[in-house]
Amino acid sequence: MVLTGKDRELVAAIQGGLPLVAKPYAAIATQLGLSEDEVMLRLQVLQSAGLIKRMGVVVRHRALGYNANAMVVWDIEDADVERIGGLLAGESCVTLCYQRPRRLPTWRYNLFCMIHGRKRSSVLLRLEQIIACHGLEDVPHSVLFSGRDFKQRGARYVEQDGSLETARSAHG
Amino acid sequence: MDGSIAILDTPAELTALEKCLLNEYQRGFPLCSSPFQALAEQQGVTEDVVIETLTSLQQRGLISRVGPVFAPRRAGASTLAALSVPENRMQGVADFVSSFSEVNHNYEREHSYNLWFVVTAADEEHVQQVLDAIQDSTGLPLLNLPLERSFYIDLGFPLWC
């Protein structure tokens, strides 16, 4: 969809979060010179268009103790990638599930998913459950736990001046 | 899922209301004039308590915000790349990779490919230039693993699942 000038102002106003007051949409509306109904309607449109994926509480999982993070990579037959990708993506504990190219002979894995947990042991236990649940015992896979974080820059969707970013990472 | 995992994974310092607000309102936040009142009615508490609890969670750094999560933009180009770095060179190579403004996430993983980073730029040629520069300067084996297909639908971050 094409964003109107007002949409950009709206996105810029809410990307840092709604004000935690009784009537947050009215507060945003006052700030932008819109009506409360207009703000709610445009937010509904932005969600329907898929530009806003979800609205709600955005948790900081590391602060909540979710420090164990495993990228699990699988070597899945090409014909089966779609089916298994869909199964893994549907697991409540899987965040992110992507197909990527193999780089033979050094890299055989073509499906990537992420599992977070508060402890390594719980991540591994969940992985075991997923493997058992979906019959993936014979699928070669590797578990890459994360170590030091050298750089993490959260991308903002719209710069403060209202211009759109040219690109944003889709890798998480 | 196994109940024992939920117990292992539940931080004791959170109240039942806090856990509920953290877990159950990551999506579907009401688009109505008084959304916190709507949450309050669902939870059987007052609007003030909901607002105070969310404010406290935010002040304690446990939530970044109550608001929208945007879809990744498809404009531009990006890739996930990995390097195989000898342990004694890790910090130097990591700092070098981080120095590129096109790299927005750079982290260590336990594997022979042990440094993973995301490169984002206006087009694929520019992404490739950054990868070439990193490979040429470090002399290390590099994997370029661009996204081919996403199966993932963002329903929020799973807590105590």
Image: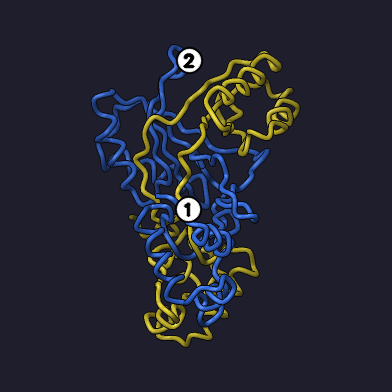
- From the viewer's perspective, is A68 left or right of A111? right
Q: B157 above or below B132?
A: below
Give the structural element (helix, strand or loop) at label 1: strand
What residue is shown with label 2? A106
Q: Position of residue A5 (x, y in %)?
A: 52, 58
Query: In this structure image, what is the colour of chain A?
Result: blue
Question: Residue B141 appears in which quarter of the rendering?
Answer: top right
Disc number lying in front (1 or 2): 1
Amino acid type at circle 2 is Thr
**Is there one chain holding both mark 1 and mark 2?**
no
Between the residue at mark 1 and the residue at mark 2, the CA separation in whole angstroms equals: 35 Å
Kindly identify which chain the residue marked by label 2 belongs to: A
Amino acid type at circle 1 is Phe
How busy is the neighbourhood of tag 2: few (under 14 within 10 Å), some, or many (20 plus)?
few
Looking at the rendered structure, the number of numbered marks drawn on it comes to 2
Whether residues under marks 1 and 2 lie with C-beta atoms below 8 angstroms apart, the answer is no
Instruction: Find residue B70 and name its label.
Output: 1
Query: In this structure image, what is the colour of chain B?
Result: yellow
